Amino acid sequence: MPEEQQVEEFAQTSTKDALFGTVPVTRGERQWGFLDFSWVMTGLGIATWAFLIGGDVVYFLGLKAGIAAMVLGNAIGLFFVITSVLGNTKYGLEHFTLVRAAFGRHGVKPLIYLINFLVAVGWSGILAIMFGRAAVNVINALAGTEYGGDHAFVALFGVIALILTWLVVVKGPVALKWFNRIIAPGLTIVIIVMLVFLFSENSWSDFTSVQPLEPFGNKIVDFMMVVEFSMAGALSWWPSQGNLTRLARTQRGGAWACVIGLFVVTIVAQTVGLMAALWYGDADPTSWMIPLTGAGIGVLILLWIAFANITTMSVQAYQVCIAMRQEGVKYLSTMPWGLLIGIFLGLSALLLIRPSAIYDNFFTFLYWIGVSYAPLIGIMWADYFLLRGQKIDLYALFDHRDDSPYGYWKGWNIGAYVAFAVGFGTYLALLNPVSLWYSAPFPYLSATVPSLAAGGILYFIIAKLWLRRAGKGGYLPRTVAEDAGAPTA
Amino acid sequence: MSTTPAHTDPELHAEIEKRLAEITAPDYEDPARKDFTALDWVAFAGFLAACAVGFIIWGY
């Protein structure tokens, strides 16, 4: 059989597997108790991006205030992320299947094909740049060169990372399962090694005495800038959390496992990143390793980081492109697998044109995630807890008739998009993710929390005053039988 | 009760129908269906809030 045909058959099988992976899971299929799920979440919490977020704190705050801001931001962000996906655990639903209840079966598609896709493109581009920077630092250490962060070699190695990712995803991501099993333990060792070297010649007070690099000079503003991108970092888990927690055996166990992995472990990894960034006066994790541990160990760590990034990019590319091939968009479902992966990674490659533009301002990318996800989470929170009382009509989620409870207007809920637009605008009125312009309330309210609240509250009002009266959304009072998940029609 | 086919794949549609029938059956029991109790909410929000407040007092 020609290789091209084999690749396509593999992709079709994968897509079919993925489609079957989106059906509701039943009790017997839930794999993770509290301890198992804690381990999964810990694996997610320890990743190279944690160094990036911790490193970026160095622009605004010192060690103690930086840790406090990261804790506050993660606590707020994760509270809403974790509680907003309790419905996925309860009913075993794939993430965006539950989102259909609020946005409609077609209304959910822009969230998948646009927002989720662009966020993934951004992450892949950033990880490719990190790969390129790590490679250039290895070359500098071995060849005695001094190539900078925007040198053509960074872009070149970034492209190599994307090509390697393409090869891995096209040829078969089975190996990724094995890569994933060694990445987290390897990065745990990296963190321990970094801590040992950091404290071998320095004391805690040495780190607390180091000043941030480019603060605004107004402590509460600097503090809120870090809280803001820490919240956004937490919100970025939202789509993947919905899919993962549906495999948890209980809502309580799933929620607390997320707290352990994504809160406690992540804060530790980010703190180590912040300490290294403060000590070397540089937010880029790839620039710390060789000065910190010496050329031998430093090169090994950089190679491990590069390997870890290829794995993360491959998993992401695979998941996003499989999602793109699912229901709804015909030309994507028939597009050759290699071409689809190529388009995804090709868009990521655009970020390599000037690596420092996004990589050295990584936190602005996080702010964009906040703009996009905060109002969505607010709407889902209002929909699931306030309007539906944690009761979902499961049949309606899969019913594609226009008059089904979640059919709205030909599958689109205009009300949800109005609320989303207002939440989006609220964020921009408080903080500009590009220029970092902020309005007077921002230092006291943040931008994410008001955006999330605006989206949620407005959607609640719209649902009560408009959708319910129009007979849309299944918001009318339910019977006892319907509360058990039975059909409404 | 059945749904309008969500997918063109009849095999997948049948699988969804089968699972919906199972998980909406009156006798279906699943520990995951148990919602957070008031105590769960207090413990969960309280832990995160206590961490946040404690670290702000310590670090800010």
Image: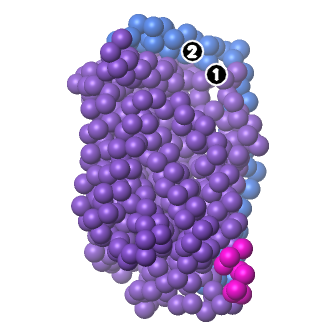
Chain colours: A purple, B blue
Local SS, label 2: helix
Q: Which residues are magenta?
A: A196-204
Residue found 39% across the figure and 55% down from its top: A128
Q: Chain of mark 1?
A: A
Q: Position of residue A82 (x, y in %)?
A: 59, 49
Q: Residue at x 63, y 51 (%)?
A: A184
SS label for mark 1: loop
Quick check: is A290 in the magenta stretch?
no
Q: Which mark is residue A26?
A: 1
Distance from Cα at disc 2 to Cα at disc 1: 7 Å
Residue A328 appears left or right of A75? left
* Residue type pointed to by label 1: Thr
Vertical comparison of A413 with A73: above or below: above
Marks 2 and 1 close (CB-CB < 8 Å): yes
* Type of secondary structure dominating the magenta stretch: helix
Query: For the residues tagged 2 and 1, is the chain the same?
Result: no
Whole-percent x, y for residue A306 in the image: 49, 55
Residue A152, image quadrant: bottom left
Up the image or down, A107 lies above or below A132; here it is above
Q: Nearer the viewer, residue A149 or A213?
A: A149
Label 2 resides on the chain identified as B
Residue A15 higher or lower than B60, as above or below: above
Q: Is residue A67 visible?
A: yes
* Residue of label 2: B19
Neighbor class of circle 2 (other Cα within 10 Å; few <14, some 14-19, many 20+) is some
> Which residue corresponds to the image point at 66% horizontal and 23% vertical from the top-left?
A29
Tell me: A392 left or right of A319: right
Picture coordinates of residue A289 (x, y %)? 55, 71
Q: Amino acid at mark 2?
A: Arg
Image quadrant containing the C terminus of chain A: top left
Residue A199 is a magenta residue: yes
